[in-house]
Image (cartoon, rainbow, N blue to C red):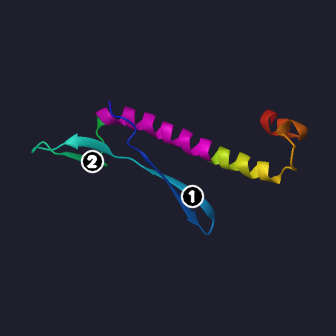
Amino acid sequence: MWEHQGHDLQNVSEKGLLFATTFCRPFEDQSGDWRNSTSFGLNDLEALMNVAVEAKERITAHMLKRCANSLGSLRPPGASFSDSRSSDLVDG
């Protein structure tokens, strides 16, 4: 099994922050040199799915943290989330 070889990319565009992930897998060529490939065989697909889920979780956590930081800058000094209606966001 291979480690997380996905690369999370953060780009700024006219529409704001965009996130993308690329995936590659290491392999040893005939001369013994290690290279990366973006081609995946049947035996790689389950690991690729796991890495894709991990990448999604990392990007989501990053976006939520940025959102929380933005909300924090909108609160009056000394206010906490418990002072507001943030429970409405959590409870739906």
Residue 35 lies, with reference to residue 83, above or below; the image says below
Q: Residue 36 at x, y = what percent?
A: 27, 48
Q: Residue 51 at x, y = what percent?
A: 43, 37
Image quarter in which the C terminus is found: top right
**Kind of residue at disc 1:** Leu
Per the image, the residue denoted by label 2 is: 36
Residue 12 lies, with reference to residue 4, above or below; the image says below
Badge 1 crowding class, 10 Å Cα cut-off, few under 14, some 14 to 19, many 20 or more, is few
Q: Is residue 58 magenta?
A: yes
Q: Residue 67 at x, y = what percent?
A: 70, 49
* Residue at image location 84% in from the left, 35% down from the top: 87
Could you tell me which secondary element the residue under label 1 belongs to? strand
- Alpha carbon of mark 2 to alpha carbon of mark 1: how far? 25 Å
Image quarter in which the N terminus is found: top left
Furthest-top residue in this view: 1
* Residue at image location 84% in from the left, 40% down from the top: 80
Could you tell me which secondary element the residue under label 2 belongs to? strand
Q: Magenta region, mostly helix, strand or loop?
A: helix
Query: From which residue to which does the magenta span run?
Result: 43-62
* Residue at image location 78% in from the left, 48% down from the top: 72
Q: Residue 66 at x, y = what percent?
A: 67, 49
**Which comes before the other along the chain, label 2 or label 1?**
1
Q: Is residue 32 magenta?
A: no
Per the image, the residue denoted by label 1 is: 18
**Kind of residue at disc 2:** Asn
